[in-house]
Image (cartoon, coloured by chain):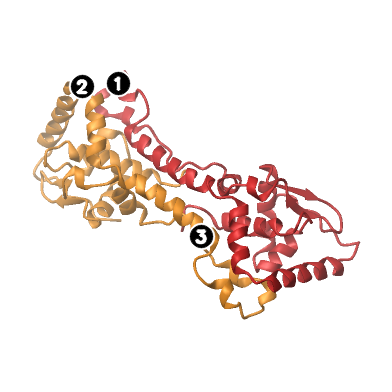
Chain colours: A red, B orange
Amino acid sequence: MAHLTVSVEYAIHCLLWLAGSAGAPLSSRDLAELQGISQSFLAKIFPKLEKAGIVVGSEGVRGGYRLARAPAEISVLQIVDAIEGDKPLFDCQEIRDRCAVFGDAPPVWATAGVCAIHAVMLKAEQAMRDELAAHTLADLAVTFAGKAPPEFILQVQDWMTERAGARKPGRQSKPEPPS
Amino acid sequence: MAHLTVSVEYAIHCLLWLAGSAGAPLSSRDLAELQGISQSFLAKIFPKLEKAGIVVGSEGVRGGYRLARAPAEISVLQIVDAIEGDKPLFDCQEIRDRCAVFGDAPPVWATAGVCAIHAVMLKAEQAMRDELAAHTLADLAVTFAGKAPPEFILQVQDWMTERAGARKPGRQSKPEPPS
């Protein structure tokens, strides 16, 4: 198992599709099917991205999600934090103040400042976060665009248009509520 | 919950005590009691450190664990990997090859090389690992020694000696087997 959940991977992939949709909302149901991932799983991811101000949901037959701001303004770190909830690398339990020789009264020197171990972990966490913050959705989109042939983008657009067209007005395609 | 488990914190704290024991083995039972942490929990941590070649266990009444090499030769990264098992930051599921428009035959361009998202995660992970590798047990021991008054070290040595002296030859204090 990895430190970051698969939800982060799904979120970034979906956001890349939204970055390429030229502002048109895409339904989470279509995005799930397009990418071969679970609809119910994805339905739990989008509300987190919406709460973090990364996407905006709209209701209705042609509803769905679109980016709330430009891809260059959305860092990988912001997406990770939206999904993982700013989970720390290390959660210091401050066991330094439990030393048996202190009895019930740990001295001030023992608990003053940040624990040396925690300080190293904070530096490592910051190095990781700095790197994640240095890459945006726009950077990823450029890399992707450099790999995918133009006809692929058109194929996906056709696929999305076909799906939206096949959707009857009676069928709801608004963003799924968080479960 | 943090990315790194509390076992990492316990392991580093214990190794700091071993770094200060001048080569004398310390029992995991005493280390647990000294620090106010669970004996059974700690008994699962030491075998991982031993397997990784960070500590060496010895049996007998005065047995226990000692460092397998100098504190300056033990990095925080090595301890984290010993406990967490080289857990990756991100486990790419390669969902890029599942795109519905590919059918069952994703084209070569879609799956060639490392996924752009995965590449960013690998950079972030490397930045974190570089920082953890840059700090050793010796560095932490120096920081700790700069905080703790000399009498504290003597108090702990007395506490350990008392514990070892009170241990009867019939009582086993060898390293606990992994459970």
**Which quadrant would residue B161 be assigned to in this image?**
top left
Identity of the residue drawn at 63% across and 64% down:
A145
Q: Is residue A90 above or below residue B177?
A: above
Residue at image mark 1: A109
Q: B178 or A45: nearer the eye?
A: A45
Q: Do the residues at discs 3 and 2 belong to one chain?
A: yes
Residue at image mark 2: B149
Position of residue B22 measured from the top left corner of the image (x, y, whole percent)? 11, 38
Q: Chain of mark 2?
A: B
Give the left or right position of residue B51, taking residue A60 as reference.
left
Viewer-nearest of discs 1 and 3 = 3
Amino acid type indicated by mark 1 = Trp
Q: Do the residues at discs 1 and 3 belong to one chain?
A: no
Q: Is residue A102 above or below residue B45?
A: above
Amino acid type indicated by mark 3 = His
Q: Chain of mark 3?
A: B
Q: Secondary structure at mark 1?
A: helix
- Are the two marked residues, 2 and 1, in contact with CB atoms closer than 8 angstroms? yes
Identity of the residue drawn at 28% across and 23% down:
A103
Position of residue A155 measured from the top left corner of the image (x, y, whole percent)? 73, 73
Amino acid type indicated by mark 2 = Pro
Residue at image mark 3: B118
**Which quadrant would residue A109 be assigned to in this image?**
top left
Q: Chain of mark 1?
A: A
Marks 2 and 1, Cα distance to the nearest angstrom?
A: 8 Å
